[in-house]
Amino acid sequence: MAACLTGVCLVCSAILGGVYAMTKEPIEEASRKALLEALAVVLPAEGEVNPEAQFIEFDGKNYEYYVQTLDTAVVCWAVKSAVGGFGGPLTLLVGVEKGGVVHATRVLSHSETPGLGAKCETEASFIDQFKGFDTSVKSLKVRKDGGDVDAITASTITSRAYAEAVSNAVKVVKKIQEEVQ
């Protein structure tokens, strides 16, 4: 009985290892393609994007970011920012121009409730309010908390998390700019 169980475990392990080896490269390629598509959304159309990730530590967390240049001058950064939402981690890619102006945002992954918090990925009126959001003039908090962000109906926690992720990305860009100067 023990030999039979051992044999079954070895066969299952070999199958699992084989499936992992076969799917690893396509999964990585799909992730890379999704990232490039997200970069095209959150960064301005003009300029050249360095597709190599750079990293910076801010407030005890590591942030991944990408740089867009135009004639060797940096014009925008795309920061990957993750915070806890209602259903789990909410990860955004946020394009931030000089001066802390948000160019655009894109949800990379989330575990929010379908039909409620998941609207953070599809509800245009919610997403579009972050385009051109000038953090020197407006507050990246939901209106319920005294800010300038309109929350998704019945999804205040997700809306707060989204705004926090955008705010963190802006702070990261400010730190990057300070370190360069």
Image (cartoon, helix red, strand yellow):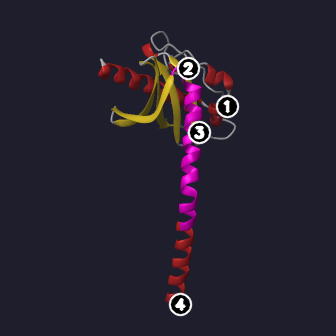
How far across and down, in percent of the image, does residue 106 sit? 58, 30
Q: Which of 165 and 145 is in front in this view?
A: 165
Distance of mark 1 from mark 2, alpha carbons? 21 Å
Pair 1/2: label in front: 2
Rendered image: mark on residue 34: 3
Magenta stretch: give its range: 18-47
Q: Considering the numbered disc 3 on the image, is that residue within a helix, a strand or a loop?
A: helix
The residue drawn where x is 59% and y is 45% is 30
The residue drawn where x is 67% and y is 21% is 125
Q: Identify the amino acid type marked 2.
A: Pro
The mark that comes first in sequence, 2 or 4, is 4
The mark that comes first in sequence, 3 or 2, is 3
The residue drawn where x is 35% and y is 20% is 177
Quarter of the image with the C terminus is top left
How far across and down, in percent of the image, does residue 40 sit? 58, 28
Q: Is residue 135 above or below residue 8?
A: above
Pair 1/3: label in front: 3
Q: Which of 49 and 144 is in front in this view?
A: 49
Say which residue label 1 marks.
Answer: 122
Say which residue label 2 marks.
Answer: 44
Distance of mark 3 from mark 2, alpha carbons? 17 Å
For residue 103, which quarter of the picture? top right
Rendered image: mark on residue 1: 4
Q: Identify the amino acid type marked 3.
A: Ala
